[in-house]
Amino acid sequence: MEFELYTLQNGIRIAHKRTDSPVAYCCLMVNTGSRDELDHEHGLAHFIEHVIFKGTKKRKAFHIMSRMEDVGGDLNAYTAKEETAIHATFLKQDFTRAIELLADIMFNSSFPEKELRREKEVIVDEINSYHDSPAELIFDDFEELIFPNHPFGRNILGTKKQLKKFNRKHIIDFMGRTYNTDQMVFCSIGDIPFSRIVKLSEKHFGSVQPNPRNYQRPPITEYIPQNKTVKKSTYQSHCIVGTTAYDLHNPKRIAMHLANNILGGPGMNSRLNLALRERHGLAYNVESSYTPYSDTGIFTIYFGTDKADTDKAVEIILQELDMLRNKRMGILQLSKAKKQLIGQLAIGAESGENLMISTAKSILVYERPDNLINVFKLIEQITSLEIMEVANEILNQNRLSTLIFK
């Protein structure tokens, strides 16, 4: 069964897929993330994701935490560059409990000052843990390198100095400006009739006052390739080679996803893994990723290696990129690559939580749910010439930036 859709009068959109599983999922996603922060708000979107669980007009923090856990369920949230989501997993008979809790958290949070002070210390520990993990920190630093002086380039966690300044007024102002009802999607999956979903949505979300978005996100600045080496007291060198890439509305993004999977996807047979690890023994872990956003995208290749082997590893990576740009893939080789990507997407969609999150994002971006069958057809239509085309447009050495922790 496909997702069924409904829109409340205040603009909040509802999407539901009925399944026969005893387990159900729901999330409330808003098209707001760290890139929506003003300069003095750096880290505020993530801070709100933490403190939104710390009390409402009728619940204290303990009661929020216990509400789903008492019935074996799970409640969580995340903040990204362009969206924030609260989501829950539970048994289908507890759906009413879940939707009421999400509505209470999103629209009735009280943000007690005592809880704000305590949670700041938690986030300071989170920031410190990132600084202790160069393999994670380097991704944030790379985005800052290629998107300088832009909210998109700032890390999501913020800084300790800015974090200490946040108070309840900052939160209320930010949510009032960016948590717009026409930018919200409630998405659910489970063995619940759609008519009941609509009724409960009207009850818990329908009374929320309309708050349409009336601002534009700052445009992405011109990309200028950068190369930077940072001295770190680490056993390994950590390196990212990457660039900006196609956005979510570019039709070439599907071919870019396939090219990325060929280069350094999760399979052990990716070209970069075979070249760096299997043939030369230079890296335990090498991976590439392509993440499209509303008006830009990011492609990265990450690896860790012995400091003495850094230059050699980069050289091998550039050779693999050149091969993808200049050597046309054979019919059998391309067919295998397509089947691999289709299989990965199909398996990923079997996770109710993954499917729910991706569907909510699709509605925010495209005004409709993703249809996997259509996505598979688009993948099947990709030609070897298209792979070469995107590789030459995006993976050209003149466009690449490099960040090395050494």
Image (cartoon, rainbow, N blue to C red):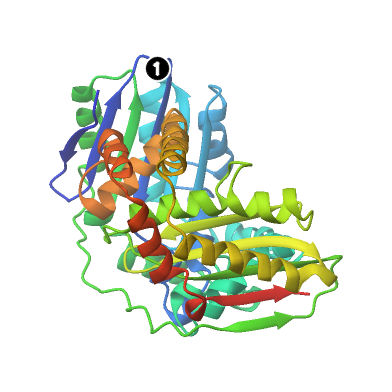
* Residue 270 visible in image: yes
The residue sitting at 23% across, 28% down in the picture is: 2
Residue 59's place in the image compared with 38, above or below, is: above
Residue 252's place in the image compared with 154, above or below, is: above
Residue 92: image x %, image y %? 40, 19
| Quarter of the view holding residue 230 | bottom right
Instruction: Say which of 360 and 231 sits in front.
Output: 231
The residue sitting at 42% across, 22% down in the picture is: 94
Residue 10: image x %, image y %? 17, 50
Secondary structure category for the residue under label 1? helix
Query: Amino acid type of disc 1?
Result: Gln
Instruction: Say which of 104 and 264 sits in front.
Output: 264
Q: Quadrant of the N terminus?
A: top left
| Quarter of the view holding residue 320 | bottom right
Residue 8: image x %, image y %? 16, 43
Q: Residue beneath label 1, please?
A: 93
